[in-house]
Amino acid sequence: MSTDSGIVSVPVETHTHYIPSPESSLNDQVSASRSSDSLGTEDSEALAVLELDVDPMGLVTLPLEHELEAQQRVTEICEEFEKTVLVPQALAAQAERRELVQQGELDPAIAAQDDEIMRMGLDPEEVRDASMVAEYAADIFEYMGCCERESMANPNYMDFQDEIQWHMRTTLIDWLLQVHMRYHMLPETLWIAVNLVDRFLSARIVSLAKLQLVGVTAMFIAAKYEEILAPSVEEFVFMTENGYSREEILKGERIVLSTLDFNVSTYCSPYSWVRRISKADDYDIQTRTLCKFLMEVTLLNHYFLRARPSLIAAIGMYLAKRMLGGVWDDAFVYYSRFCEEQLIPGASLLLEKLIEPGFEAQFVYKKYASKKFLKASIYARNWALRNHHVFFSAPTHPSFQSTGYVCSAKAP
């Protein structure tokens, strides 16, 4: 590609739950995927994968040796949670179904089917909902865990950029948030667009004059990929106030996609992981809304380029629970696969962003200050200003101040 387009090539470094049958022993039926999560120091392959997940600077993750210990604890907690919570729940549900069958209130065939479903480690209610694809959930999340590493950008790509800096990326994403909100696009569209921007800037040197073009092109591609009815090219031209022509956006689309080898689908936004974690608190609307705000705040901080989407989701849910006076109990560890110790570095970094002077001027703050989003940003910033010193000094102490976050409107 010629340099007069403002973009040149640059070489860069590549960077379930299970319910056992009551007729058999728990140890014999522990999921193979669960045991594979246990990373021993002698397992070189697992260690190599773990090293990819660890932030060398220790900004959003624990150091490697502490991460190994934390993951071992997660494995132990998950196994104990299955044994002491999920298995008794399954047996109690089975006994209840048998009683209903005896009373003639439940069809024996349905009861037998539900028993078989629970022996497979699935929730009968979720299986009956075809949109949940519960029978494929374990395979889906395992695949997503592999894909999220492949779709991460180089967290140091600004080192080889000539004209742009990190604060310019923040400005661009703030503008993308406004465009995304203006056209009522899906949450995943925003996350895919930002991921495309970061991955493209990891592979190409971009001039300042073309930075917004990269952003609008990424949103154009993400909308075509995710939306049922995506905005037209002309609408994207209007978004830039005619700063770029229709032909420039279409040419930019070809450049971005060819640079990324047309690889869009490997990225899985944190929203997918939040949906699973939310099962721990029965999909509490206040926690989820606050979590969504906190996750979008991470888009503005380039340090979170070092974090996988699953980690960002867990950090958002963890900090949301703490802000609402909750605790990160074994259920959250089970569904997120992260213990509290693993989330404290990222949560601390996120709190620092919330208490920055002038944070209220960011569009993400204004967006979530509305009743539609339960005024989540106002609550989160006020909480952060009151409690950040306590969090930094003793993050696991239960004496956080919480002022009863009351839902004032129905969230979408």
Image: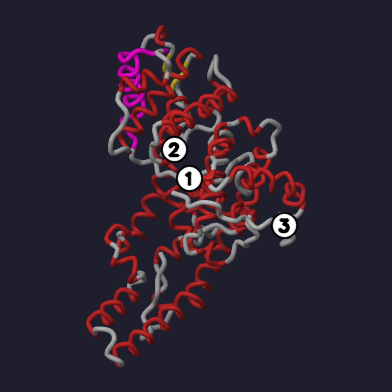
Q: CA distance from mark 2 to mark 3?
A: 31 Å
Q: Amino acid at mark 1?
A: Pro
How far from the left and from the top, in percent, is residue 20?
A: 39, 77
The 10 Å Cα crowd at callout 1, few under 14, some 14 to 19, many 20 or more, is: many
Name the N-terminal-most of marks 2 and 3.
Answer: 2
| The disc label shown at residue 191, or none | 2
Dots 1 and 2: beta carbons under 8 Å? yes
Q: Is residue 324 left or right of residue 306?
A: right
**Quarter assignment of residue 194:** top left
Helix, strand or loop at mark 3: loop
The 10 Å Cα crowd at callout 3, few under 14, some 14 to 19, many 20 or more, is: many
Q: Which residues are magenta?
A: 243-264
Q: Residue 314 lies in magenta, yes or no? A: no
The residue at which mark 1 appears reads as 309
Residue closest to the eye, 121 or 274: 274
Q: CA distance from mark 1 to mark 2?
A: 10 Å
Helix, strand or loop at mark 2: helix
Q: Which residue extends farthest top?
A: 4
Q: Would you place residue 252 above or below residue 361 in this image? A: above
| The disc label shown at residue 400, or none | 3
